[in-house]
Amino acid sequence: MNFDFRNWQIHVGTPHPFNAERPRPDNGTARPDPARYYDPAWARQEWEKVFTKTWLLAGVVSDAPESGDFFRYDVGSESFIIVRAEDGSYKAHYNVCPHRGSQLVLQPFGSADEFICPFHSWHFNLDGSNASVTDKETFQPDVLCHGTDLSSVRCEEIAGLIFISMSNDVPPIRDYLGDAADHLALYDIGSMNVVQHKRSDWAANWKGGVDAFYEIYHLHSVHPQTQCLMDDRTQIDLFPNGISRQFVPFAQPSPRYADQQTVNAGIKIMLADAGIDPETYQGTAQETRAAVQQAKRARSAQYDLGYEKFSDTQLSDSTIYGIFPNVQIGCHPEAVFIHRFVPHARDPEQFTYETIILFKHENIPGYGAPAWMGLAPGTDTTGKTRPEIVHTPLGEPPHLGEVLDQDSELLPYVQMGARSRGFRGPLWSEQEARLRHFHVELDRYINDNKEWGK
Ligand code: FES
Ligand SMILES: [Fe+2]
């Protein structure tokens, strides 16, 4: 084979330990059966063999900073309560009362000394143990002997992120994430606050969402407006356990874009993000990425932001991690953008696309979240107020910003095509290597041959 996709080289940042050449796994060239995108039997297997057998990102530490603070995490047919216990550790319980199965916590967030069931008011301690059974004397002891505590699952915090697992077989989250745990720790997500949280229901399989956000091959076609400020030659790295990374150069036009010189409107936004006045900037569009990097280094030196830990690429570009199975995290020193692709409880042709923006507040003139994240004007970025979760039902535009709304319009068409008799499975390019890496990992779980660290 004389084809080497790596000749389409990409990464043009400062050398960084994270950019070390890694052995690339051989994920083959197979075309997977598209049944995975629509077949209810496939979805049931996926739930039993993947979602209940791996780590799932449940939330972020800033959503439960104090003892007794809790939030809900709903995925597929399950709901969990994640709570910060008195000892500072995080606990996760199924959001279900052992009496008659009512959900206990009905709101997305809160703070409590104990949980009280809304049906017959049994009480539970934060650690899930039963605190009281209402009219206990009316139960035969042998009935209560079956157990009156909440059912709990594993819960671990790492890099400001809280993961849960329904499985006792999965290795600790540190081992599961591998090097990505160290990379994510650089961003200090634990000191960031949620400044926007949106959910929208899309008429597509959750993996259609993963696929669409794991590549930027479609940018020139679906999001042509990004071509003036994003280079679509990206670096892709594939890690064990289905984890992947992509560096997407920002503040530099795509080679598909005709005018490489003029400081266009998109480039001006990138300059402003870095605190450079676009009106007095003397460079070309091609030179902007380096100018952004230098400006952020200078800002860090002036305000002691500690950016020495970041490569130039990490300052200017989007550094994106795919965490198997259903999360992608776009990282910038100022803010991170979490995408979560939440499978529907019953319908494999629906999922909830959830986005959470976390921002590291600094009192620095001109400093803010990257403009591409599209924070609404007037958003409180100080961390003093936790925004409500905005949920958009199926069929309504999600109002996620122009680019993400374009994805939401397209994905139902991809879903319809996936179940056509005429479609026999995706043909992935090496620009879509993360998709193949993800699906090959998925197949390991489905085929019962998952080995940790592979
Ligand atoms: S269902 Fe919870 S107390 Fe009855
Ligand atoms: Fe897109």
Image (tube, rainbow, N blue to C red):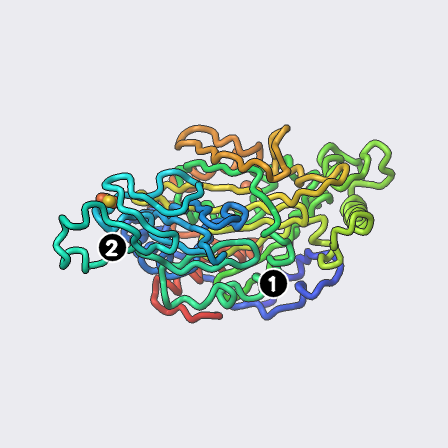
- At which x and y percent is residue 210? 47, 49
**Would you say residue 16 is visible in this rendering?**
yes
**Residue drawn at the location 30% of the way across and 52% of the way down:** 131
**Residue drawn at the location 59% of the way across and 49% of the way down:** 330
Task: Please state the quadrant of the image where ligand 2 appears.
Answer: top right
Q: Give the labeled residue for mark 1.
A: 182
- At which x and y percent is residue 398? 48, 32
Q: Is mark 2 within 8 Å of ligand 1?
A: no
**Residue drawn at the location 54% of the way across and 57% of the way down:** 433
How far apart are the two marked residues, 1 and 2, measured between alpha carbons?
A: 39 Å
- At which x and y percent is residue 218? 56, 44
Three-letter amino acid code of the residue under disc 2: Thr
- Which is more toward the observer, 362 or 121? 121
Q: Quadrant of the N terminus?
A: bottom right
Q: Tell which tag, 1 or 2, sits nearer the viewer.
A: 2
Q: Give the labeled residue for mark 2.
A: 148
Three-letter amino acid code of the residue under disc 1: Asp
- At which x and y percent is residue 18? 66, 64
- Residue 335 lies left or right of residue 143; in this view the side is right
